Image (cartoon, helix red, strand yellow):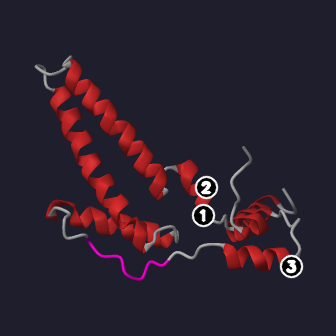
Amino acid sequence: MGRKKEPVNVLIEKGKKHLTKDEIKKRKDEELVNFSDNIAIPKSLDKKFHKEFLYYVEELKRLDIISNLDVEILEKYLIIKDLHNKCIKALSTGDNFMDKDLVLIQDKYFKQLITLSRELGLTITSRCKLVVPKKDEENKKDSALSILFGGTV
């Protein structure tokens, strides 16, 4: 099985310019566009999650990795995260510390949480695959180092 295709912008920013202008144009035309113009809090989401939902939406919009279709996944992520936290609290009490069934449930919630966080781009590795690296920050660091130490570093 081959590697997944990276977006053209990511390839170009990484300095891999092995594609012709026609190939770049064709791939850009084929790539999906994220529409994030109609993201709203789902009616089925409990009010206690609204603030956290909006926080995640704003952060993911800043990275341009959320779309209107991700709302349900984010809703499920918040619910599973809450259930996982409840299991951890229940396990931390003295009576339930070694409850085998509760440990299994907590483990299932944890696995679901990790899967959903990867889908949403909430882990570092998943974000690196989705977000175009910025060269401007590298240039600023290099210029700051050259000012401090003189010349190139």
Label 3 element class: helix
> Magenta segment range?
35-41
Of label 3 and label 1, which has the lower sequence position?
3
Is 30 placed left or right of 45 in the picture? right
Q: Which residue is the site of mark 2?
A: 128
**Residue 57 image offset from top left, x and y in percent:** 38, 69
Estimate the spatial distance between the alpha carbons at disc 2 and disc 1, rounded to whole Å. Answer: 6 Å
Q: Which residue is the site of mark 1?
A: 131
Label 1 element class: loop
Q: Where 110 falls versus 68 (above or below)? A: above
Is 103 placed left or right of 71 in the picture? left
Residue plotted at (21% across, 26% down): 102
Q: Which residue is the site of mark 3?
A: 21
Q: Which residue is situated farthest in the front direction here?
A: 1
Q: Where 27 falls versus 45 (above or below)? A: below
Estimate the spatial distance between the alpha carbons at disc 3 and disc 1, rounded to whole Å. Answer: 22 Å
**Residue 31 image offset from top left, x and y in percent:** 65, 72
Q: Residues within 10 Å of mark 3 (few under 14, many from 20)?
A: few
Where residue 91 sits, quadrant-wise, is top left
Residue plotted at (19% across, 27% down): 92
